[in-house]
Amino acid sequence: MPATPMSQDPPTLPLAGSNLPEFTVSELSLSLKRLVESEFGRVRVRGEISQPKYHSSGHLYLTLKDDQAVLAAVCWRGSVARLTVRAEEGLEVICTGRLTTYPGQSKYQLVIESMEAAGLGALLAMLEERKRRLAAEGLFDQERKRPLPRLPRLIGIVTSPSGAVIRDILHRLADRFPRPVLLWPVAVQGDAAADQVAGAIAGFNGLPDGSAQRPDLLIVARGGGSLEDLMPFNEEVVVRAAAEGTIPLISAIGHETDTTLLDFVADRRAPTPTAAAEMAVPVRADLMAQLLDGQRRLVAGTARLFGERRLRLEGLARGLGDPARLLEPAFQRFDDRTERLDRATRVALERHRAALGQLSARLVHPRERLAAAARHAAAVAERFAALGPTLTDWRRHRFAPLAGDRLDRAVRALLARAGDRLAASGSLLDSYSYKDVLRRGFVLVRDSADEPVTDAEALAPGAAISLEFRDDRRVPATVDGPAPPRPRAAPQRAKPAPGQGTLF
């Protein structure tokens, strides 16, 4: 603390025996609180809202001001829910409440119990600002609008049960097309109206899909009134409840000139509640007339269409001719091609059979080849036997000078090679001989002419035959019984000549 200048007077001490009462800070604050509350038990204050703050506890703190003074204000949580006006910066309002003090900060404040806009201009400005803010969120976009059902199964109505609105709607529905109606009674004016209307819209939309109590269409209706009377339908809670719903909604608030924010978010706006009923259902008589007219037009159109198609079909039939006559040439061509194919097949078979006969005639039977080889071998043996001594003498005379061990070795080697070739030829000859087959357990059947029998059909019953075994012994025998039928061999397809096509 800075030192007190010596030139100042010393502090005044209380006089002894003074009769002024002595208060503590709490006592004085409590006395002031009682005095202020008794003098200003209930007041209405008009001012501009400044620094509004919605606390997490639910209370609302704000300041009311004019051009000369400010007044602190508080609205407790229970009263905030009943306010018809949302506290916004710069909004001029009229607040009703009681004046009290707050000893903790040595200030007085207004405890707000209700709040209303100060004048029509301020109310319209507030609604315009709210409309702009909600539109920026996309709640009023046309893409969000849902089509109304053609003929709803159940209609839900949100309105007052005691007003003339519900009677007008029911009467209009009965005249046009009677439909079941489910009424959700609500207050349509006052502080509690906005919450009740929002709760009714959310309640209808909260019913499970497919439920018998879930309506196909909602109508929110109210009769005419002033702007202040229609304020519940401008509240943000009602607008958001309508935007979040999935059931198509018709807004029928006031008369044709009345407009609320609910009209902008609703799927369809009706100028009057009666017009809302007309939008909800069609006229039954008109609908029946329309159905009958559609049925008549459908029958007439179908008959005309069939007549046109019949005439066209008859014209096309005359142009096409008789289908049987069109098929007769095709049948004849088919028969002709079939006959030509049969002839070509027989001719091809005969040609291949003749070619096969020519090739078989050119082939030499193995027995003939063996006989020719045997005759050639016998001739060579005879010639060799005849020339053997002479050749030996000539060779001996020619190679006499070369006689000796070298000649003996050469002759032995030459004879050995010749013997090997002779043995190989003998083995090859044995492999072609039927003797090797007989050694494996088979027998050779010969007829009376001593010719081998190759087909069973060549043997007649009682014919004399002989059976030759591997030891060259022959056993006579006689054929007993007819020969078994010869199995029919599958025809073999002849290969076509190179460069020539085939019909197979």
Image (tube, grey):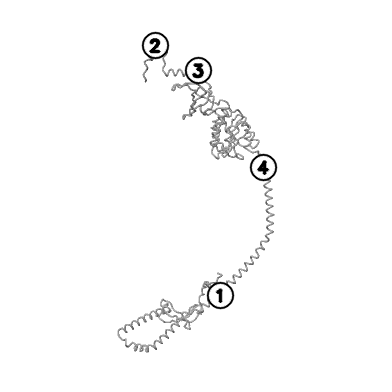
- Alpha-carbon distance for marks 4 and 2? 106 Å
Depth check: give the residue in front, 482 or 395: 395
- Alpha-carbon distance for marks 3 and 2? 34 Å
- Alpha-carbon distance for marks 2 and 1? 164 Å
Left or right, 303 with reference to 90: right
Counting residues from the start of the chain, the first of labels 3 and 4 encountered is: 3
Verify CB contact (< 8 Å) between mark 3 and mark 1. Answer: no
Residue pointed to by mark 2: 15
Nearest to the eye among marks 3 and 4: give it.
3
Residue pointed to by mark 4: 290
Badge 4 density bin: few <14, some 14–19, many ≥20, Cα 10 Å: few
Left or right, 237 with reference to 179: left
Verify CB contact (< 8 Å) between mark 1 and mark 4. Answer: no
Name the residue at 68% across, 48% down: 301
Name which residue type carries label 1. Answer: Arg
| Place of residue 81 in the rendered image (x, y in percent of width and height, measured from the top left) | 51, 28
Q: In this rendering, does residue 204 appear at all? A: no
How many numbered marks, from 0 up?
4
Q: Which label is found at residue 351?
A: 1
Counting residues from the start of the chain, the first of labels 3 and 1 encountered is: 3
Name which residue type carries label 4. Answer: Gln
Q: Quadrant of the N terminus?
A: top left
Residue pointed to by mark 3: 39
Counting residues from the start of the chain, the first of labels 4 and 2 encountered is: 2
- Secondary structure under the numbered disc 1 in the rendered image: helix
- Secondary structure under the numbered disc 2 in the rendered image: loop
